[in-house]
Structures are given as C-alpha cells and as structure tokens.
Image (cartoon, helix red, strand yellow):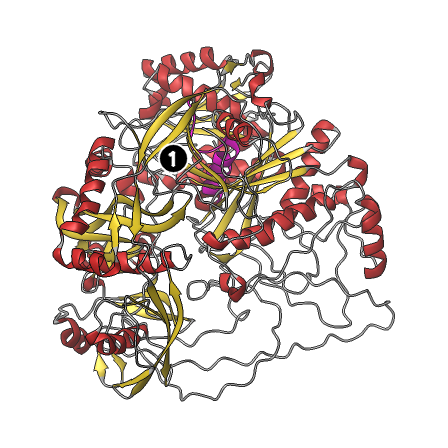
Amino acid sequence: MGPKKQNRPQGDNQPPQQPQHQQRGPPPGLQQPRQPQQPRQPQQPQQPQQPQQPQQPQQPRQPQQPQQLQRGPPSGLQQPRQPQQPQQPQQPQQPQQQQRGPPGFQQQPQHQGQQQRPPGFPQPSQPKQPGGSWGKQPPQNQQQQQPQQQPQGQSQGQQQRPSGFPQPQQPKQPGGSWGKQQPQQQQQQQTTTTTTTSSSPAPEIPKVSRKDLVRDDDIQDVAITPAKPRSIQSQPISVITNFFPVVVRENRSVFLYRIDYDPPQVARDRRFKLMREFLATNSSAKYDGDSLLFSAQRITINSQHVDGVQILIKLAKELNHKDKSITQFFNILTKSFMRLMKFSLIGRNYYTPVGKRDIPKHFLEVWKGFSTSVIPTEAGTMLLCDSTTKVVRSQTVLERIKYLNNNPNRCAAEIVNSIVLTRYNNKTYRISGITWQGQNSKVTDIMEGKTTFLAYYQKNYSIRITDMSQPLLKSEVKMRGVKQTIYLIPELTFLTGLNDEMRKDFHIMKDLAEESNVEPYKRIETLSNFVNGFNSNPAISEELKTWGLSYQQALKVDGCVLQAPKNIQINNSTALKNVRWVFIVEQNEFQRGECQKNLDLFIRESQLLPPIVHFPVLPKSIRDIKSNSYTDIMEKEVNKGTTFFLIIIPQNNAEVYKGIKMKSLIQYKVLTQCIFSRTFDKGRPVSIKLKQQVVAKLGLAPWGLGQDIYKGVPKKTMVIGIDVGHNSDMRGHSVVGFVATIDDKFQKFFSRAYAQNRPGKEIIDTLEDATKEAMKSYFNHNNCLPELVIVYRDGVGDGMLDLVNKTEIAAMKKGFAETPSSWGTKPKLVYTIVKKNTNARFFTNDNQKANPPPGTLIDSKITHQNWYDFFLVSQVAFKGSINPTHYHVLLDEHQMAADLFQFFTFQMCHLYFNFEKSVRVPASCQFAHKMAFLIGRTVGRNVAPELSDKLFFL
C-alpha cells in the first residue's frame, strides 16, 4: 500500500447501548402551534458602587458558545444563563392561544436563565455588573486543598457546573501565579513574554454561529497525510467493504432549483403537500422539504399558485456527477427508494415490521432494517449500506405503567428519558416526563380549538382511545426552531430498546444476540441482495433510468495487517506487599468452602497480603439491604489506613453499588472492587481478570509493551483520551471523561471528569482547564512538559467536526500557552477524532468472507479525498461482524509518517488493563469512556482529587 494522494487540499462490563434517535415532530395533519412571543430580555440591575474600593479592570469577555448547540433541558431544568445578546427588533405580538396535543400542546418557552437547576446543584450566578468587583481566587495551594470552592464571581457567560465538578478557572496570569487580575494591556504584554517558548501563540477561541457551520465533508484547514515513505512492516490483505459505487452517466445533469413560498410556509408537512401538487406532472423531481428541488429536466415556469400559495422557482445550478452537492441529491433519492420499498424511518435508519422476529416471552419484537448514506470518497461517490435491527416492545407504555402499579416513582425511573415509538406514524420521541391525572392534562382535554385528543386520533388515524384515566407522556420537540412540549398517549406508544433489568437477564440477551449478531458471510450477502433489489424493483428501476444512475457490486480494497505487540508482564509483588486491604462478605457466604478457596486463589494471583475479613449484618431480603451495611465497616477501616476494599455485593441491587461507590470515591477517598457472589464463584478465570483490575486500580500496570511502541514518537509523549457520555442520570447533563498518560511508558495516568453546562452538549467547554491540569500533573511527575501530545477524541457527533476544529483545538493550545514558561517548551499537538460507531464493515476477500484479523488497516479508496483519515480493525469479534474504527487527524504538528502514527495507534489499543486483548480504541480513550459512564450513571459528581492518579473507574 502506498501513501495517500498528496495533491489534497488542506467496574463491570457495561451493557451495550441503544442507538440514539432524533426527536420527531408532530404527526402529519395536525396544525402547527403558533409562534410564541419571545420574552423581552430583562435589564440587569446595577450594583451600587463602593467608593472605598478601587475599581477592578474589566475581565476579558469569554468566547460565546455557538447558538446551535444550546439544547434546552427537560421541563423544570435550568438552562445556563447566556451572555446578553444584542437587542433584536421587537416582534409583533401574537395572540396567546393554549394548545394541547400529541403534538400541538405547547408550553410557553421560558426565558433562558430563569429556570432552576436540578435539586442539589448550585444555581447560576448573576453576570458581573458594570462597576462591580470580581471575587478573588485563593492561592494555588489553597485551591488544591479546597478543589470544590467556587469563585465569588464569574465572567459574563460562565455558568456554575453541578456540584462536585471543577468550575471554570480564571486564566493563569504571567509570572506563574494563578488567580491575580492584571490590567488588560499589561496582561497581554506579559503573556507575550512568558510564552516565547511555545510552539504556537495562545489563540482566542473563535465565536461560531449556526450559519458558519459547514458539513463534515466540506471541512477545511485540517491535516493532510504526510508525504513520507512507509517504514512499518506489515502483511497485505484484500477486503470486501459495504461501500457500493454509484455510477452516473457523464452526459446526464441534475438541475438544482431554489424554492420560495409567498406567503412563507413554516410547517414542513404543508410544504410537502404544496410541492406534491406542484410536481403532479413532474414526478421524477425530488424535494428536500425545505428550499431545494432537484429535477432531471429543466422546469420552464418561474412560479405557480397552489392552494392560495405562490411557489417561486429559480434555477440555482446545473449539477454534474463531480459536484459536491450531488451527494445531497443522492441521499434524497435513496430515501425515496426506501419509502417505495415500504420501509419506515425510525430515528436515522429505515425499518420494516415485515419479517420481524417476535420474542413473546419477553414482550419484545426485533425489526430488521438498513442504514444508508451516500458519501464522497477517494474512489468516487459511494452508497454506504449496513443492516441493523431495532428492539421494540410489544407491550404499550400503558400496559407497562399498569405493570408498575401506577407508581409514579417507578414509572418515572423506567419511562422518563426513554425512546418511544408511535406506530400510527412510525416516529420516535424521547420522553421528558409523565403528567398524571389531576395535573391539568388528561386524554379528554381539548388540544386546540374544539378538537380533543379523542377526536384527533379518531379523525386522523381511525384510532379509538379506550382508557380515559391514563396519564400523558411529555416530550420536548423543536417546532419552528422553538423547543415546545407535546403530549403523547401511553395507550398508543411503545417503548424501544432495553432497560437495565432486561440487560441483566441472560436469556433475553442471548435471544437478542441471535438476531443482532449476524455472521459476516450472511451480512455481506444480505447487503448485496438489498442493493441489487433496487434494480429488480420496477418503480426504482424506472427512476434509476430517469436519473442515469446504477449501483455496482461491493467495493474491494487492498490494505495491510499491522503486527501486534507482545504484552510484557510486570511483577508488582513488592509494591503490593504494602497494601492494607479488607474483604467484606456475608458470613454464611464466606463459610462456604468455595468462597474461601476463591479468595486464596485471588491472593496468589495478585500477590497481595491476606486481607482483613469483615462480615456485615444483612437483612434476609435482598431488597432490604442498604449500602450503609458496608460503608459503616469501611469508615472504621479507613481510619486505620485501609486503602482498598474487595466487597461481595448482592445481585440486582443497584442502590448498594451506588452507595458504596459514592462514599468511597468522594468521602473516604479509597478504592473499591465490587463483585457478585455468583461471579466470584467462577474460580481462576475470574481471579485472573480481577487481579488485573485491582492492580490497575492501585496505580500499577499489569503489563507493558516493548520498545517498538516508540517508533516515530518521542519518549516524552502524552496520550490523552476524551469521551463525552450522554447516558447520564444527572438530569440530562453530559459528562466529559478526560484521561492523560503522565509517564514515558503510558502506564500512569491523570484522570478528571467535567460536567457540561447544557444537556446533550457535544463540544467541550472545559478543555482549556483540563489541559492545564494535565500539564501540571505531567510536570509534577517528570519535572518537564511533554514534547508531543496526542489526543484521541471520541464522542463527536455528525456535523460537529468543523466546530471541534475551530474551538477545542484552540482551547488546548491556549492551555499549553498558559502553562508557566519555567516548565519548558510547550508541546506539539496531534488531534485525532475517533469514531467507533461507524457503519463501515470489512470482510475477507475469499470464499469464507470472514472478519479480517486485528491490525487490519485501510487508508485508501474508501477514505475521504480531502482528509488525513484511516480505518483500523484493532479488536477480535467473537460473534457477529466486526466494526472497524475510523480515525480522522484534524491537526498534525509533529508530522510523523502516516504509517508510524497508524502503528502507534494500534499499539495503544493493547494497554487497556481491564481486558488482556486489544480493544476498539486506544486505551486512554476507553478509560475516558469508562470514567464518564461511571460518573454520569452512578456517582453524579467528580471524585476526590487524591484519586486522580488511579484508574478508580475500572
């Protein structure tokens, strides 16, 4: 394989996660709610001036986060106060009208900054007033002793995070002192002086608005593949991909038209209805639902009146098969093919109940479907197609509510934040709350005008609602760009996905695995038959002829297989001899010979000294067991110097696990390993895995890698893994996991979690603070700064690449620049986006069509023609078809050869100490994912700083 073309432009295994779905709008046919009046921005009161105190210089304004990422929280959750926007021209007031309905019932949008934080979290502080003074931060040593202390004042636009997480720091001032305010002019001059050794100046994080965002395919100013020869030995391999070439006859053109409506039409369903009538004589044209129309022939008219609306048509461009915009048309066309084949859009993929698999004993259905996307690649335009499944409950939400005895707390725990499907229109919604009877909303209420819920469903869907006492489900959706509350009927909705109880059921997971884990040869056969079905379908075949299109067979690509490193076991017996630890187990359980036998086996494997054994007093019923039965013992032992606890906990009692983790990680500042008795009884295999986890938690490395790991990278290299977890129980707040290596063997770590200000936010607004903390930890361990920092950034959603490129990289560089110059030269940066949930699939190009081996690298043909990117298979798939991981290098200041960076990335996948084989992403990235999951789902706040150098989350 040659390099890419150089002429480019610039504690326990967690359950599988269900894919996230977009929140859908109202069913077609329902009148859209009127635009609510926007509340006027309240004028901030001025604080009285204090003549006795000199006025502080104005704090430099913090960069404003882009408007499009401000996703509103569920009802009742505080949105952080945003910086005051320039006054907009006053809109004419609309008459107030209360509307209700599955979609249609809306609540007046609340003013940003006027809601309340979740109970127990600090409320947003008022922005600084003119003439006011800012709170002084404590000295650095005091900050370390009191990491949770909040500054008395915050700059405009900053918000407080949920309690227990680091608050945004004041920028470090020149001369190495933190927290002192300097006059702005003097500060700028001194900053220039103290950063002369930096590889790049401290850039300001740019402000990016929605209109400035670009599609991922069109991103610019990113790294290109270095033009350096290959030096890494590898074995060649040929694979079949699930990329199907789209061939367009060169003499065919597609006409792109701009569509406008007079008067403007806000409702998407209304626009589609008008366009269908307009296109009655031009059925081959495809409309995007907004303002673009693609046609195979020229349209000779400029306007036409339809149902009292004037439709204006203007030719924008004549497209050929090489235009970038052509992929948008191909995707619209493919979606129309899916509808012709009777597939329904659920979330982002298309499914059909035809041929569904029923699992009646679990009240589940498995729908089969496909994901499709037309994308540009080095080898041309490709249809990326993969098979997928959707788990849908056969029970309605109402039936589930009755099963839970109409208990509001139990129902909220299971239904709120879940995704439901409405089968009458095959749309999905995320539930934000439940409105019970007596809370001003019920099925007999009027939605709008004189239409009730009952009449609406009877008229539009011929559905008769039978239960008049059922509650209503609340969902937050965007209509006309404004977040509004709609109400759904439990009798007509179905939960999707699995709850925690189902995930713990071995029989359910086994039955589902038989449906979802499709063997490789069956998957590629299914995909090939599906794409070939486009030609065999008469309606689709006719459209393909009209547009001059055809699909070829699955693309074959040549790649290589990188050599895996050899794990070198490390003897930690000397360090482990000094560990004082406690084993907590129920007395009857311990007196069984099997438990003592397994404990002795674990002691031999781990080389720990024999533990102190404690027997908690537990009630007979598992449900009555509380965490304090264990934590009371822990508290006494912590005072005696115990630093590690191995605890046998009851099955299916999440509250016990949560209570132990919160006390140990926040209050006691010790490490724990919780394990079920059933798991502990499995003997040697579990003892070996348990030994690896415990050794890693204690800050030691079970194994290391050879010297080959340093090919192309300096020994003073820091590897940072970042992931954003949205599966948080903290009222929807996302949690950022940040894990950085701080030694030259990549075996010691600095870890920290950060809460995002707004629910579902993907762009990290604490990266500058995290970078400065990581630099400080590295310096304390090595007495210097790293020469190179390699970042593996996971958790970036589609469409976010440009924003990450413009904000997060700038924030990290600013963090580098603001470290004291006495610490050494600032590091160079390599910033890489990691996407492990890609739809790409690889199959060996032979008769078996099996999964390719770990180390399989593909960096040509299916990669992007303007990117420095590659696909890497680093793990073994024990069942089903393997998923390669997609890496995209946004910034490369080190300019190492591409094959050296690819090899280094593969090596990093072998240092995840919770699994003896390689994993899908570099170890630091997987560590960050595990930490974000534990903090978001169990602990709810950051852990004690004393544990930041331990892998407490394994």
Residue 896 figure quarter: top right
Asked whether, in this view, residue 882 is left or right of residue 215, the answer is left
10 Å crowding of disc 1: few (<14), some (14-19), many (20+): many
Kindly identify the residue that appears in the image at 18 percent across and 45 percent down: 532
Is residue 495 within the magenta segment?
no
Considering the whole magenta stretch, tell me its main secondary structure.
Answer: helix
**Mark 1, residue position:** 884
Q: Is residue 267 above or below residue 470?
A: below
Asked whether, in this view, residue 201 is left or right of residue 913, the answer is right
Q: Is residue 744 above or below residue 627?
A: above
In the image, 496 versus 238, the foreground residue is 238
Point out the stretch of residues depicted in magenta: 917-935
In the image, 149 versus 4, the foreground residue is 4
Q: Amino acid at mark 1?
A: Pro
Disc 1 is placed on an element classified as loop
Work out which residue is located at the far front of the displayed protein and give it: 251
Kindly identify the residue that appears in the image at 81 percent across and 64 percent down: 57
